[in-house]
Amino acid sequence: MTISHSAPRPADPAAAFAARRLPLAPPWASPRFAWASALLLRLGLAAAFLSAVADRFGLWGPPGTGSVAWGEWGRFVAYTGAINPWAPAWIVPALAWSATALETALGVGLLAGVWTRALAFASGMLLLAFALAMTFSGRGVEAVLSYSVYTAAGGALLLAAAPAVPYSALAPGGQRAGTP
């Protein structure tokens, strides 16, 4: 009599193969996908802020050129007054300079990866303030939706809450966050 120490063969080889296969997770469920998405969002927000600032100073071209929104500082100050009709005329230039300084600081900080979560939260709040000012200034909601301001605000707030903040100079515990 021969004693076999091997496992018995299954009756259905296809069922055995299916049982050994690991279930495949969708690509968006992986830590690398979350990391890459957060990096793309961080860089996209930084680029959007810095591009808007560049447009105010005519770096994308003069007014009326291609997709230039302002093309010069004076037109941006006038726009700031238009979306803040509650503001007295003497404070409008200060609002324009404040918005420009904040967007520059947030854009550079996000680009550099410094205090990413805090800057992403501040970006979300600033974009939400812009969206509300644009919505309730009498110009309606179309421009806010066309420029995706609410979407950018939501993305910035999601970045602030992201589980992985790529290449953040000041990650939790003072360690730089790299790739997963």
Image (spheres, grey):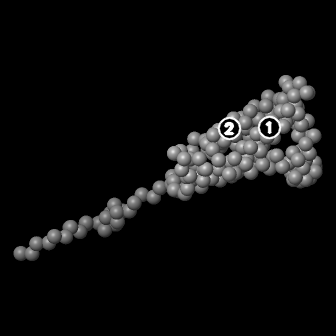
Q: Is residue 4 above or below residue 145?
A: below
Q: Which residue is mark 1?
A: 99
Instruction: Report the residue that reaches farthest toward the front.
Output: 174
Instruction: Tell me whether circle 1 and circle 2 mark residues in contact (CB < 8 Å).
Output: no
Depth check, front residue: 129 or 121: 121
> Residue at the location (55% across, 56% down)?
178
Instruction: Give the quarter of the image for residue 156.
Output: top right
The picture places residue 170, in percent across and down from the top left corner, at 59, 47
Q: CA distance from mark 1 to mark 2?
A: 12 Å
Which amino acid type is shown beneath numbered disc 1?
Ala
Depth check, front residue: 176 or 163: 176
Horizontally, residue 136 falls left or right of residue 5, namely right
Horizontally, residue 164 falls left or right of residue 78, namely left
The quarter of the picture where the N terminus appears is bottom left
> Is label 1 in a helix, a strand or a loop?
helix
> Residue at the location (93% across, 51% down)?
62
Q: Which mark is residue 122?
A: 2
Q: Which mark is residue 152?
A: none
> Is label 2 in a helix, a strand or a loop?
helix
Instruction: Report the residue that reaches farthest toward the left.
Output: 1
Horizontally, residue 125 falls left or right of residue 87, namely left
Which amino acid type is shown beneath numbered disc 2?
Ala
